[in-house]
Amino acid sequence: MAGLSWIQTTVCAPGTLVITADGEEGAGESPQLDIALNGRVIASESFGRRRTAEIAVPGAGILTLTFVNDLFLADVRLATFAQPYLLGGSCNQIREVRVPPESAGGWDEFSRSGTVVRNSPPITMVPCGAGRLSIALKGQAAAGEYPQVVFRQGNQVVKRVFARKEFTRLNFPVDARPLALAIENPYAILKSDRNLNLRNITYKTITSDKPIP
């Protein structure tokens, strides 16, 4: 389980919930699973090494299992770009922004903003023609250094700049070829990742064993 995750089912009678699970600690704390019946927490279980916990369920109702303390901490150098458009040409649009899945970057068409994380593969913007590109850029430092962003058309570097903490609007000439964005000094290190692995869940009533779907 990752993030604020939960599993929910309905039980028709009192019984015993049997959970086999294990987990990875994060920031010195084991993953915690809260068990609630009809919205009231009846038990909390922490899991490190694989073990089996048995929880008495006092009645019928909606049974909810919630992973309550997920944690993911990473030190990542990244750049955010926003509102790109062209000045001084016959058109002013960026026709397309291409984000390869392997780039770990992103682009949101609604806000007209995106992120750059890696050197390769780059994110590519396709201008509608030649002109001066206006684009806002800011950076998130990691290991004490801000990202250095490079803009290339073909094999030519058209702009190289450090992306700082606050947005700065850049303005530089480009032609009609696709424009590649990349970070020349990428950096990412995982600091902590707390996870919960549910291996088996069974609900036992007096007369039967009912696996939770």
Image (tube, grey):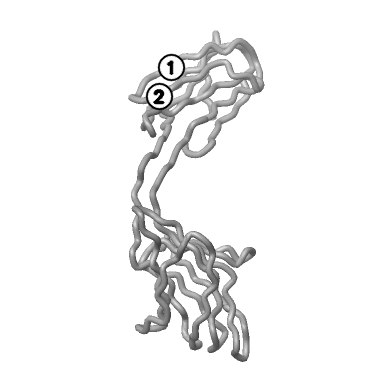
Q: 171 or 125, which lies in front?
A: 171
Q: 71 or 206, which lies in front?
A: 71
Q: Alpha-carbon distance for marks 1 and 2?
A: 9 Å
Residue 66 falls in which quadrant of the image? Answer: top right
- For label 1, count other residues whose C-alpha is less than 10 Å away and answer few (under 14), some (14-19) or many (20+): some
Q: Position of residue 33 (x, y in %)?
A: 49, 25
> What's under tag 1, amino acid-wise?
Ala
Q: Is residue 126 above or below residue 176?
A: above
Q: Is residue 106 above or below residue 64?
A: below
> Which residue was labeled with disc 1?
53
Lower position in the chain sequence, tag 1 or tag 2: 2
Q: Position of residue 197 (x, y in %)?
A: 41, 32
Foreground label between 1 and 2: 2
Instruction: Report whether residue 81 is seen.
Output: yes
Judged left or right of residue 23, residue 176 is right
Q: Which residue occupies 55% across, 31% down?
A: 7
> What's under tag 2, amino acid-wise?
Phe
SS assignment at label 1: strand
Q: 209 or 166, which lies in front?
A: 166
SS assignment at label 2: loop
Q: Position of residue 139 (x, y in %)?
A: 46, 61
Q: Which residue occupies 53% across, 72% down?
A: 97
Q: Which residue occupies 57% across, 65% down?
A: 113
Dots 1 and 2: beta carbons under 8 Å?
yes
> How many numbered markers are drawn?
2
Instruction: Report whether residue 102 is seen.
Output: no
Q: Quadrant of the C terminus?
A: top right
> Which residue was labeled with disc 2?
47
Q: Is residue 25 above or below residue 77?
A: above
Q: Position of residue 118 (x, y in %)?
A: 38, 63
